[in-house]
Image: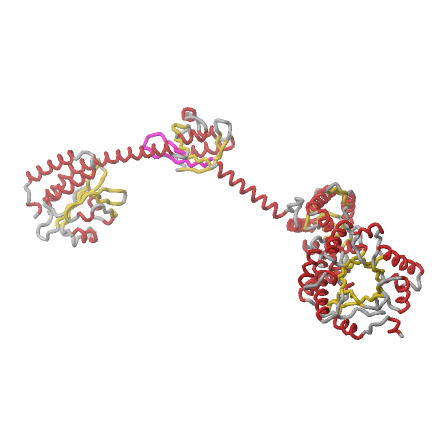
Amino acid sequence: MPGTHFDSEQRLSLILETQQAIAAAGDDLESVMQIVAERSMAILGADGSMVNLVEGDMLHTRAAGGSAAEVSNVRRPIAKSIARYAIKSGEPLLVEDTRTDHRINQEMRGKVGDTSLICVPLFSGSDVIGTLNVMSNSETERLNEEDRQTLEMLSVVLSAGVSRVAEFDARRAQAEAISRFRTLFEGASLGILRLDGDGVAVEVNPALEQMLGASAEELIGSRFSAHLIAEHRQTVDELLAETVAGKRESFVLEARCTTRSGGSLWTHVRAVAEQHEDGAPMRVVAMIENITERKRAEQELIRQSQLNEHQALHDPLTGLPNRLLFGERIGHAIRHAERNNSKLAVVLMDLDRFKEVNDSLGHSAGDHLLTKVGERMRDAVRASDTVARLGGDEFGLLLPELSDGDGAVPVITRIRAALERPVYVHSLPLAVEASIGIAIYPDHGTDAQSLIQKADVAMYDSKRDNASHTFYDEGSHEYDVTRLTLVAELRRAIASRELILHYQPKAALESGAVRSVEALLRWMHPERGMVYPDSFIPTAQETGLIGPLTLYVIEEALRQGRQWRDSGIDLSISVNLSTRNLLDRDFPNQVAALLKRWGMGPEWLELEVTESSMLANPTRAKAVLNELSELGLRLSIDDFGTGYSSLSYLRQLPVDEIKIDRSFVMGMGEQTGDAVIVRSTVDLGRNLGLEVVAEGVETLDLWNTLRELGCNTAQGYFLSKPVSADELSSWLKARPAALPEAEAA
């Protein structure tokens, strides 16, 4: 048996030698534990041994020998180890048959291969600090009671040695931890502050000195809260008091510290109660991070967020509420009016001919005008009213708390008066005219959308009737819906090429030869049939569709002209322009591109403009006409005599012909005044070197009279009504090359 290797005296001698070996090992815990493992195994003649230290709920094998060597440095729960029974009893425990004893961890036994075992608790004072396990793997020489008693004697020596070295090792670990803490404390980028129970600084690190711009001598001995702005001091003092009293283990907050130079900075403070021995005064360690830049970034994000919110609800040019905010305020006002049984007015105002300002003076001038209009409107309304810019040249006005609809009129009158004063743009006085539509809650609608829609209808009525302002009229709504439908259908018609051209010939009065035709627009509506220009051109001019519509007509005319030329018919084609075309500086470039696309020279295209279209903006119109003339196009003044253009202005324009309005031509036989106008116009054209075209020639007598007066060209039903391109081609082929008198005869 293992116990028969040495007698009692020999074992005692070995125990004393073990004590001396442990003492010689000094403070090296690993060496001491290895000596314990090897000597205990040798004294009993055992096959294996292990020294385990208690680490909380775990048992850590720190040294092992013999058959147990492979489990060195293994950790396992105390609850699953034989050690828990030895620790509980406080005495060495003998297990004579490990295979059948329920207290044995069979998984561990399988690794070691022991058949018997003694587990000895090791003490430091009254506390168990570990265990010594000695094992035998023999089936015949198992550990016995004598071996247990020997280890019980040895345990006194082992406990003293292990506990002494363990304590020294713990003190050394503590010293190393303190050293590491000091290194971190001194070199940390965060400010670190140790406070006593009264919140007074007892130690500070260099980072905190640098952060606050004060030396350690200045900071130590002062309350931490003294270095905070006034509104944060009480909060920090209360949190520190709760931490010192054990009511909380830590706290975190953001506070503004003051610096020695008089400035301040934002800090993130994390304070933790410092672990201490019983009876030692409580301390608090505070880690302080400078988060000024982060707070600045947060404030910038908040500011940007507020700015984004403001921009989302306000017009960037005028600073006025936009359409979204305008709608929200109408909703609030409706709820208030509903509670108080009052009325409110929603007003829409559109600036007349604003596009001309943009086109003639530039967008910066238009922006300046819009800004001034917004300011004047704001000054003219009550504090409770809302002025908004809804987009482009359209403004909105909300007038809450009205007793009746007429209550809106005084405000509109003040706005009108404010707009009567000219706005100076580039030193030019600009007159501001506007169309104003008004809808009343609840008479015309009970929600924001319907009130805005009704005010919009009324605004277009005001524009159409040239009225100061117009209240919504249910009878005009049907017209407005029709107008909106017409705009959508016209836009579709351009895209799907439902619009067609008819052509009316123009003939030389001397020879009767047809050398040109006028293109006249017709709309083959899929449901309404043939629609004439008077039904849709005014709407196109109001909505801005006139631009693409004119280009459509020019392209169709050039396409047909190309087709005629290819078939041997040489005809120039005239097309009518609108006011908007003469204000569009890019229009000449667009016409040039169309000529190039269809391979047509400029001599095959004539452009007709009215006197009124040129007078809308004479400077811009003259510039555009000059560019068109430089392309080689023939220019004609249509409906001459119905406008008020001066002869001096007419002489400045690059026109090639004038067309006498049909009303004067048809009245020549009945009205002496009309005959005088026609005769004067023919003389004027001759003196200015311009060709003269008479419109509305419907009889042979008119033809002959005009020819005698010296008029150059005639156009009218006497020759032909406007017809399709195919019909005109057939008419030209069938028409004899003779004067109208011969035809009439």
Name the outermost residue toward the top: 217
Q: Where residue 319 sits in the image (x, y, percent)? A: 66, 44
Q: In the visual, does 227 lie left or right of 486?
A: left
Q: Is residue 680 above or below residue 370?
A: below
Which color scheme does this rendered protein use?
Answer: secondary structure
Question: 224 or 559, which lies in front?
Answer: 559
Q: Is residue 25 visible?
A: yes
Point 84% across, 62% down: residue: 693
User: Is residue 738 one of those drawn in magenta?
Assistant: no
Q: Is residue 490 left or right of residue 104?
A: right
Res 474 seen here:
no
322 or 1: nearer the viewer: 322
Horizontal and vertical percent position of residue 425: 73, 43
Looking at the image, how many numbered discs can be counted on the residues? 0
Horizontal side, residue 516 vs residue 586: left or right:
right
Q: Give the image location of residue 322, x and y in percent.
A: 65, 48
Q: Which quadrant of the figure has residue 163?
A: top left
**Camera-side residue: 210 or 601?**
601
Report the residue at 20% width, 46% height from top: 72
Image quarter in which the C terminus is found: bottom right
Residue 467 % position (x, y): 80, 52
- Give the magenta range: 267-286
Viewer-closest of 627 and 431:
627
Does the magenta run of residues contain 282?
Answer: yes
Task: Give the residue drawn at x 59%, y 44%.
Answer: 307
